[in-house]
Image (cartoon, helix red, strand yellow):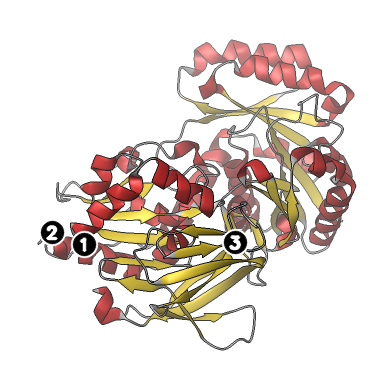
């Protein structure tokens, strides 16, 4: 069995995911065959493995940091909140069912067996498993059903490092309280790390000494607050305002920006689809529900949704559908991704009650398509090409790569892209639809294709009578550099010798 190390936090957002990614890169670069693992993740950002399994996007990034292919065993249980219906439960990459909280807790034995099975399988293939907990391990009302923190740490015989977020305030109380509430299970915590520090270390130092004295657990490092980390966020807490927080790296950039407004849906999912735009020098990204911003954008994107029908009805109730129609009539580009693509059609049918009690809902009516929700989810990696390039206004930029995650099948005026699903031997399929200045697709990750993304931006520039520009942004290379930079910061600020000792390397 592989050696293991577990990163737990005093709460959500403490920085566990990125710390695991950094450690995966550090150990991989030191010659250790490491892999990430999170027994259970609750997230609306997901990724599709080569085999067609669905896992949390964070575990895919961690696998990338470890320079290995993501697999379903790295995240055996994924929960995707679907509103009042509860959460969609995905086990080993495939949809099991939709459950409410009490139903899922009653399901604990099955979930626990799946988590152990995946860890054991992963452990046979790697030297070191770097594990991530979820939320806090000290939720005293949930300890008997918790399978993602101390239970799996004990199964893996993994020493635990507890991370506290000082930026939220009360970090020492959070560390101390976690240890005391855990009782005898606190013996598995071998060290503390403080994250997101931006102050005077000399003022902090007495607190570091005192928390160690009070609990007998050493503090092995303080990580600085990192601005513009350039890596995907785990959840939607960051979807406020625009990408102005990103530093301008080139003083010669034009002041005129192409403005892309992404509708901030109630059940927005896979918003990391749009991260590549964040780093383009001539683009401003805004997440918004503001009519004025929608009607004055260069491009409006309706993103994916975990509850397409509810978000469609929300747009109508908020009268944002009228804003989108006015934007369309002004010639502003309207784009729909996955659930957003479905909303742009004429009708959505839900005969099996997959998402709601509504058997039929009128879409926004921009695209000549209709969608029917089915019981089986389509999950696969794809490669393909743009077919209707002359109508699209963007040239054919070669092979496109991405992945599909959707419950519905759309029919009608389909054929913007021609795709091949990599996990099956199926024939070529058509995807996407276009109608004037409105288009949509099921292809997640399409904007990670550098030439395609730049083609879209230059098309928007042309509409503004701005000259096209060549961007040096290569998104995959940028992520690699960002992971390396994060790993360097962690290596410089944590006691890696101590970590190696508690692992037994």
Crowd tier of the residue under label 3, counting other residues whose Cα lies within 10 Å: few below 14, some 14–19, many 20 or above:
many
**Residue 269 visible, this orientation:** no
| 122 to the left or right of 252 | right
Q: Name the residue tied to disc 3.
A: 350
Labelled pair 2, 1 in contact (Cβ < 8 Å) = yes
Instruction: Give the SS element for disc 3.
Output: loop
Residue sitting nearer the eye, 415 or 232: 415
**Is 105 situated above or below 484?**
above
Q: Position of residue 452 (x, y in %)?
A: 34, 70
| 220 to the left or right of 267 | right
Of callouts 3 and 2, the N-terminal one: 3
**Is 186 situated above or below 407?**
above
| Residue at image coords 47%, 73% | 401
In which quarter of the view is residue 330 placed?
A: bottom left
Q: Name the residue tied to disc 2.
A: 464
Q: CA distance from mark 3 to mark 2?
A: 40 Å
Q: CA distance from mark 2 to mark 1?
A: 7 Å
Task: From the image, state whether disc 3 or disc 2 is nearer to you.
Answer: 3
Q: CA distance from mark 3 to mark 1?
A: 35 Å
Labelled pair 3, 1 in contact (Cβ < 8 Å) = no
Q: Name the residue tied to disc 1.
A: 460
Q: Position of residue 291 (x, y in %)?
A: 28, 41
């Amino acid at each position: 069995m592989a050696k293991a190390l577990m990163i737990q936090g005093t709460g959500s957002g403490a920085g566990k995911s990125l710390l695991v990614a950094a450690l995966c890169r550090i150990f991989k670069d030191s010659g250790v065959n490491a892999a990430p693992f999170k027994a259970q993740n609750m997230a609306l950002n997901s990724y599709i493995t080569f085999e067609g399994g669905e896992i949390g996007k964070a575990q895919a990034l961690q696998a990338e940091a470890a320079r290995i292919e993501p697999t379903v065993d790295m995240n055996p249980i994924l929960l995707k909140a679907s509103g009042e219906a509860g959460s969609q439960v995905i086990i080993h990459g495939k949809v099991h069912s939709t459950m409410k909280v009490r139903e899922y807790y009653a399901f604990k034995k099955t979930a626990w067996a799946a988590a152990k099975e995946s860890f054991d399988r992963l452990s046979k293939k790697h030297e070191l498993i770097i594990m991530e907990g979820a939320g806090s391990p000290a939720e005293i009302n949930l300890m008997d059903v918790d399978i993602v923190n101390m239970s799996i740490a004990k199964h893996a015989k993994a020493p635990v490092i507890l991370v506290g977020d000082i930026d939220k305030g009360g970090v020492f109380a959070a560390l101390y309280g976690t240890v005391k509430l855990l009782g005898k299970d606190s013996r598995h915590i071998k060290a503390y790390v403080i994250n997101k520090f931006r102050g005077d270390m000399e003022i902090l130092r007495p607190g570091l000494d005192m928390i160690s004295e009070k609990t007998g657990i050493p503090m092995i490092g303080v990580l600085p607050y990192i601005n513009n980390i350039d890596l995907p966020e785990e959840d939607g807490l960051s979807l406020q305002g625009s990408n102005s927080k990103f530093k301008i790296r080139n003083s010669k950039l034009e002041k005129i920006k192409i403005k892309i407004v992404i509708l901030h849906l109630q059940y927005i999912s896979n918003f990391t689809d749009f991260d590549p735009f964040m780093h383009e020098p001539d683009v401003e990204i805004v997440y918004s529900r503001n009519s004025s911003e929608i009607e004055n954008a260069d491009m409006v994107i309706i993103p994916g949704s975990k509850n397409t029908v509810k978000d469609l009805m929300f747009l109508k109730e908020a009268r944002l559908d009228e804003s989108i129609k006015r934007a369309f009539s002004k010639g502003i580009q309207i784009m729909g991704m996955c659930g957003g693509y479905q909303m742009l059609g004429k009708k959505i049918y839900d005969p099996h009650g997959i998402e709601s009690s509504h058997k039929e809902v009128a879409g926004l009516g921009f695209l000549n398509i209709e969608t029917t929700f089915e019981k089986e989810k389509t999950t696969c990696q794809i490669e393909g090409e743009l077919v209707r390039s002359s109508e699209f206004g963007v040239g054919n930029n070669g092979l496109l790569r991405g992945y599909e995650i959707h419950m519905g099948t759309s029919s009608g005026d389909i054929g913007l892209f021609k795709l091949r699903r990599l996990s099956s031997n199926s024939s070529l399929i058509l995807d996407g639809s276009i109608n004037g200045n409105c288009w949509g697709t099921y292809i997640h990750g399409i904007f990670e294709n550098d030439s395609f993304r730049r083609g879209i931006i230059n098309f928007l520039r042309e509409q503004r009578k701005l000259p096209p520009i060549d961007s040096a942004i290569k998104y995959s290379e940028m992520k690699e550099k960002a992971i390396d930079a994060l790993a360097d910061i962690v290596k410089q600020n944590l006691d890696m010798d101590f970590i190696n000792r508690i692992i037994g390397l």
